[in-house]
Amino acid sequence: MDDVRIGWIGLGIMGKPMARNLMRAGYRLSVFNRSRAAVDELAAEGAEPAASPAEVARRSDRVFTMVTDSPDVEQVVLGPQGVLEGARPGTILVDMSTISPEVSRRVAREAAARGILALDAPVSGGDVGAREGTLSIMVGGDREAFDTVLPLLQVLGRTVTHVGPPGSGQEVKLVNQIVCGLNLLAMAEGLAYAEKAGLNLETVLKVITKGAAGSWMLSNLGPKVARRDFAPGFMVRLQQKDLRLALEAAAAAGQPLPGTALVQQLFRHLEATGRGDEGTQALAKVLERLGGREEAPGSLTG
Amino acid sequence: MDDVRIGWIGLGIMGKPMARNLMRAGYRLSVFNRSRAAVDELAAEGAEPAASPAEVARRSDRVFTMVTDSPDVEQVVLGPQGVLEGARPGTILVDMSTISPEVSRRVAREAAARGILALDAPVSGGDVGAREGTLSIMVGGDREAFDTVLPLLQVLGRTVTHVGPPGSGQEVKLVNQIVCGLNLLAMAEGLAYAEKAGLNLETVLKVITKGAAGSWMLSNLGPKVARRDFAPGFMVRLQQKDLRLALEAAAAAGQPLPGTALVQQLFRHLEATGRGDEGTQALAKVLERLGGREEAPGSLTG
Amino acid sequence: MDDVRIGWIGLGIMGKPMARNLMRAGYRLSVFNRSRAAVDELAAEGAEPAASPAEVARRSDRVFTMVTDSPDVEQVVLGPQGVLEGARPGTILVDMSTISPEVSRRVAREAAARGILALDAPVSGGDVGAREGTLSIMVGGDREAFDTVLPLLQVLGRTVTHVGPPGSGQEVKLVNQIVCGLNLLAMAEGLAYAEKAGLNLETVLKVITKGAAGSWMLSNLGPKVARRDFAPGFMVRLQQKDLRLALEAAAAAGQPLPGTALVQQLFRHLEATGRGDEGTQALAKVLERLGGREEAPGSLTG
Amino acid sequence: MDDVRIGWIGLGIMGKPMARNLMRAGYRLSVFNRSRAAVDELAAEGAEPAASPAEVARRSDRVFTMVTDSPDVEQVVLGPQGVLEGARPGTILVDMSTISPEVSRRVAREAAARGILALDAPVSGGDVGAREGTLSIMVGGDREAFDTVLPLLQVLGRTVTHVGPPGSGQEVKLVNQIVCGLNLLAMAEGLAYAEKAGLNLETVLKVITKGAAGSWMLSNLGPKVARRDFAPGFMVRLQQKDLRLALEAAAAAGQPLPGTALVQQLFRHLEATGRGDEGTQALAKVLERLGGREEAPGSLTG
């Protein structure tokens, strides 16, 4: 490994284990996070704390950002004391957040104007994939910059693919989320009818998962619904954020998505009843309630 | 193998290869079909033609039916010259058609009144599975009757599961079709947005199929959409028949299925434009048209 | 008035007051109804009871039917002891039920084969309109037959319109019900958001009813929602029957109706929770529940 | 009339005739508009041009804004050289744009901090209502400020209603637009089926408009669809803007609106095919295309 200096901004559920994986692979990291606790934690493991994204950038050859939404990226990259204020020409910026493709393209343009190459590199695979370094990473932007940071990305994920020009990483991620949302609805409607028909859900899942109805959602979240486990792998409110981004991007591209719009509206019931932090498999409960089933009183997570 | 006598009614795209598989496994079959050609074909291979479902039943210990819809089953089983007119007590009737669970239950009741045990045993796996004997078969009805005919069903399919009382085979099949329909919509909306965004569909499929967005539909039909192949595996009009059955059964059970209802309405566009015989992946074209893309003139199958 | 002899079949919530209006206008009626009580009631007012639809027809020059659904019309008109068994050539049959246009056309064909002219003449205006003789009546079938019975229809309704060939009366009625269903959803979504936003519903209704958002539904059922009155004008389960007919007829015609399909699925929640006998304005409650509002316990009609 | 000084910002299709109505009623106006032509036009009629919203505010006791969307209001009111920079305590600000309720509340808060009272006063009635002074105006904000400006608002509209605290004018307007959107879909689905069934649209409209299916949309836009007139009263892209605001406000309030979301997606087809400037009745064309009808080639406005 060369002695490339790495900066990392955003130490949440995803960002912290990802940064840690780079440290364990032997890289030296400068880190910044809005709230201080996570910074202290990584500092205790050897990372160098920075006072701002700009300071991170000043100390680094490659800067990674992993924050929540488009405005967060705009702030930490384009804002005052942001990455672009501190970065030197030649720096490569890798934004791993899931945000608007349009914002990714703007970041790439403004970065390029200062001689900095920006890649959009959103991930799928959840916090488990972040911890285990098994994420799937879809990367948009300059091909040479991609090749340069590929060894770093391979520490973070198992499948790393260059998918096209700036913004296209985000676009592929949104395709992924559109498909996930409707596969979830498929599972939710199928199981809601199965319950109403008095079928045994485990049997149903065993029979249909192998064939044409099979999906990751059905295999992985169907059994959770069957045993009433609504703890989050991926949270409802984050899925909603991604569906919002997808519907906005599709609107800008002129593509109606009536099914995805329906999924978004049904998820809203969960948000309206305080279930935004449950796992996305809770969509099954919306269909159950439409079918007239009530949860036990007091059992908000039931 | 014992010298059990088998009757087979319905020699269409599915029924003919299934009957043939039983003959190849050494069983003797009496066969009936509405149109004569398929009967002659199987007779040339050793099957014994019958003049009516009742005659099939008179000659058989086990009677299989594989027809299109609920009224067809009602006719060949309950109607004049139907199976119940010819069958002796102790006969086992195995209906492998996909029909209304309510009709399956009625068939089972009327059969039981004459000492005949009826199983509903719909399949998934398509014509390929029918030919290769790799169908998935979900069986509702008497457990002992199931055990008795299991060796026969194992000639026809790879996975054979008893799922509950009469009608429950159909109900599991409808769950399967509900999930298939929405997984198709997931693929169609995802790819429609991907095309609009200018992404390379092969790349997108390669990247997202392995992860949380993965499904049989995406893996098997996504590449067909990418290369504009809309030839049927499973036809739009048959998927529509199954969605109709699912929505009727769900209505009777008191379960709203808004997503499935949407899928049904979108498939209608294909039927309204003469595409009912295309494969279900043509749902992608509905989304494309909503997005304003036109097919080349004269290219109805484009 | 001439001494034309009138037969009436079907004395439910709609049929009884309609028959009575004809009697009050001086016509002599033979009547039949599945359950006897309504027959006795009208007999006490001077109607002549009949033992079957055929007997009604034998005694009458004009036969009216007002029953619930397509199978009921098939039974009382085409079935054993039905109207066609008793009617002489020259009789005019007026079916005022809301049923499938396809069944209306079949009735017209089978009637014509016996020299009988059949009109389909569904109504809108509810039980109030039936009692007050203010129904709107849309009539399909032979123009001359229409002119002949027009004086009778004008006793029953205020607006009577010949709309086209056999079946077209039903088709116009289904257009009516499609529009009603979505106008109801318009009211339900608008008021659900208004409540959530903390607006005063009476004020909202006062302000928006006069302008571009105005509708019969908003003017007449909006205030009922505001004062939590869900007693039926028109019942959920009858609206559902009509939406089912509309969706089936649209399917046969090759017309997708995604909004109507959604309305039907949302109404199912009311049926699934035992509210099929409430008024259609209860659709507002489905939207409220999607928004997380719960009714007071024990308050099924709340 | 007193000699109150009036400022007007925003001289588009709506704003210009509204400002002119105030001038004709004898008021003196200072005016500002982003593009200069409209300013010159009103200046020629006696209005006093201003160089910025702040300058308008400095010269005025009451400031009206009539611009397109939330960001426009933020800019002309809260931005540099905006209204709040120029306005003195005691000024009343009346924003007649249709924007986010949340932004209206923020404007009211920031105005109040400087001793200025802000009312949100969106209108319905279109450009015809603007010219003729027959708008419906729904006003949120301080009651006393409302009473103060009521004489001015009565010059602009026929129905002027105080509906609640800041933001509630916008909320009532969004309720209005939710209902309008689904009433449009009601018309579109009803007429699409009617056409497919071969009915005469004029006859259908005549029959159903008077009864329970009646609505402003059906009465006013139905005949336009029947004669293929898709010229705008209200443009698709403006309806889309309002539906977006409604869905965002409903999301914030925790209210799912599945029907409105569907309407929005269907309108997108019009935008995707270059019909954003047609009238909202063009929604009928989306349903027609779903039913397989094609427009004549080259006839984008057909």
Image: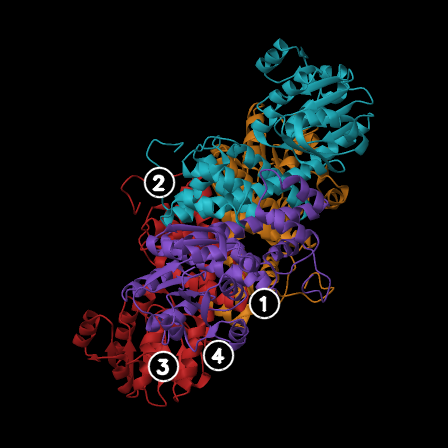
Chain colours: A purple, B cyan, C orange, D red
Label 3 vs 4, first from the N-terminus? 3
**Labels 2, 1: one chain:** no
Mark pair 3, 4: CA separation = 15 Å
**Are there few (<14), some (14-19), or many (20+) residues within 10 Å of tag 4?**
some
Tally of numbered tags = 4
- Residues at discs 3 and 4 both on one chain: yes
Q: Which quadrant of the figure contains the C terminus of chain C? A: bottom right
User: Looking at numbered disc 2 in the image, what kind of residue is underneath it?
Assistant: Glu
The CA span between labels 2 and 4 is 49 Å
Of the pair C53 and D133, the residue shown nearer to us = D133
Q: Say which chain tag 1 marks.
A: C
- Expressed as whole percent of the image width and height from the top left, the position of residue D51 reads 21, 79
Q: Which chain carries label 2?
A: B
- The residue indicated by pointer 4 is D165
**Depth-wise, is mark 2 or mark 1 nearer the camera?**
2
Q: Is residue A271 above or below residue D75?
A: above
Viewer-nearest residue: B89 or C128: B89
Q: Name the residue beneath numbered marker 3.
A: D93
Circle 3 sits in a helix, a strand or a loop, which is it?
A: strand
Residue type at numbered disc 4: Pro
Instruction: Name above or below for residue A138 compared with residue C210.
Output: above
Residue type, numbered disc 1: Ala
Let me know if marks 4 and 1 both belong to one chain: no
- Please, what is the three-letter code of the amino acid marked with disc 3? Leu
For the residue pair A15 and B60, the one nearer the viewer reads as A15
Q: Do labels 3 and 2 share a chain?
A: no
Distance of label 1 from label 3 (alpha carbons): 32 Å
Q: Name the residue under label 2.
A: B294
Q: In the image, D9: left or right of A49?
A: left
Q: Mark 1 — residue? A: C226
Residue B143 spot, x, y in % from top left: 79, 33
